[in-house]
Image (tube, grey):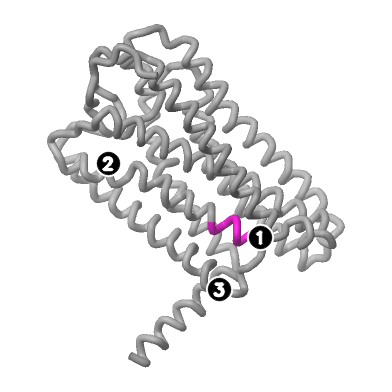
């Protein structure tokens, strides 16, 4: 429901208005975005084509990389175009779509990280029942539930955005559309909407982070009963997951769990979780995972052999 809306487009002020700095931002964003695409698409292709990486952990890693790719793609291409353009306007409808996609894939990543923690818990604490509990059908249902949950969360964001009137001004002091900067442009009292924002996005981030850290504490505690080799392998996997969880949830909690106040560092923190974390995730999972590295080498070897045959 859209109320008394006189605004048909917004102006994204971006990270800077200085022409030289905009070119530097373009180069940095392009480098990070291409690195993110290559890393995540390589993981997606490797998991999809490798027979070795058929366990539930890699099933969820596939969807994590897919979520990372879509999450950054909902923001980065637009930011790159704006960095080269003098006119950095975005229509009202495009802005709303960006809010939806940003929150859908961001929330999807939250749920996938939770599913990955559940997978590690079952694998380490219930090893004899692992394949029964985490069957392919169960994993597929869990991902489908994550999609539904992400859709509900994103639709709530859209409802909150459309429930406010926008009469002008129309300058968004950010490089992408999100509910927080949109609230500043609403010509109505946004106190209740702010509370709903914190209770929705903020609660999802905080509760999920606490649950994840608590689950990994339980997992690490249970490793005492494993062999030295089993403990080493499980510890390596869990540490990778914990690093990703901290890198993703830290900035999100900082942005979404506080009242409607802004800090100068907000934009840089947003850069970190919209492009930095999706870039780092493939590096963290591949550098600390021998199975993924070996599967990538085999994939690359097959490509070289096929090229030689041609």
Foreground residue, 163 or 170?
Answer: 163
Majority SS type along the magenta span: helix
Q: Describe the element under mark 2 as helix, strand or loop.
A: helix
Q: Describe the element under mark 1 as helix, strand or loop.
A: helix
What residue sits right under mark 2 in the picture? 79
Foreground residue, 18 or 245?
Answer: 245
Q: Does 185 appear in magenta? A: no
Residue 65 sits above or below residue 195 on the image = below
Residue 176 sits above or below residue 35 on the image = above
Mark 2 crowd level (few <14, some 14–19, many ≥20, 10 Å Cα) = many
* Residue 181 percent location from the top left of the image: 36, 23
What residue sits right under mark 1 in the picture? 56
Q: Residue at x 42, y 45 (%)?
A: 71
Q: Earlier in the sequence, mark 1 or mark 3?
A: 3
Q: Describe the element under mark 3 as helix, strand or loop.
A: loop
What residue sits right under mark 3 in the picture? 50
Q: Are marks 1 and 3 in contact (CB under 8 Å)?
A: no
Question: Where are the magenta residues, as a range?
Answer: 56-62
* Residue 138 percent location from the top left of the image: 70, 54
CA–CA distance in space, label 1 to label 2: 35 Å
Foreground residue, 246 or 117?
Answer: 117
In the rendered image, the quadrant that contains the N terminus is top left
């Amino acid at each position: 429901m859209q109320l008394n809306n006189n605004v048909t487009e917004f102006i994204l002020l971006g990270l800077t208005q200085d022409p030289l700095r905009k070119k530097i931002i373009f180069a940095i964003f392009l480098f990070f975005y291409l690195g993110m695409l290559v890393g995540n698409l390589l993981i997606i292709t490797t998991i999809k084509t490798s027979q070795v990486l058929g366990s539930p952990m890699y099933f969820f890693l596939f969807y994590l990389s897919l979520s990372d790719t879509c999450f950054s793609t909902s923001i980065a291409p637009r930011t790159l175009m704006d960095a080269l353009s003098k006119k950095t306007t975005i229509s009202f409808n495009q802005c709303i779509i960006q809010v939806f996609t940003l929150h859908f894939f961001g929330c999807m990543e939250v749920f996938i990280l939770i599913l990955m923690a559940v997978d590690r818990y079952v694998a380490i604490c219930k090893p004899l029942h692992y394949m029964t509990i985490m069957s392919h059908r169960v994993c597929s249902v869990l991902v489908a539930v994550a999609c539904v949950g992400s859709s509900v969360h994103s639709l709530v964001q859209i409802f909150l955005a459309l429930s406010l009137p926008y009469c002008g001004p129309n300058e968004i002091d950010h490089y992408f559309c999100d509910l927080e900067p949109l609230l500043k442009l609403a010509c109505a009292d946004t106190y209740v909407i702010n509370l709903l924002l914190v209770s929705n996005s903020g609660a999802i981030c905080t509760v999920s982070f606490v649950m994840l850290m608590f689950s990994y504490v339980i997992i690490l505690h249970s490793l005492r009963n494993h062999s030295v080799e089993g403990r080493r392998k499980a510890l390596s996997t869990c540490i990778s997951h914990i690093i990703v969880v901290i890198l993703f949830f830290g900035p999100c909690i900082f942005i979404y769990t506080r009242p409607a106040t802004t800090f100068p560092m907000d934009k840089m923190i947003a850069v970190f979780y919209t492009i930095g974390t999706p870039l780092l995730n493939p590096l963290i999972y591949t550098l600390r995972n021998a199975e993924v590295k070996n599967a990538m080498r085999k994939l690359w070897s097959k490509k070289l052999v096929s090229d030689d045959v041609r």
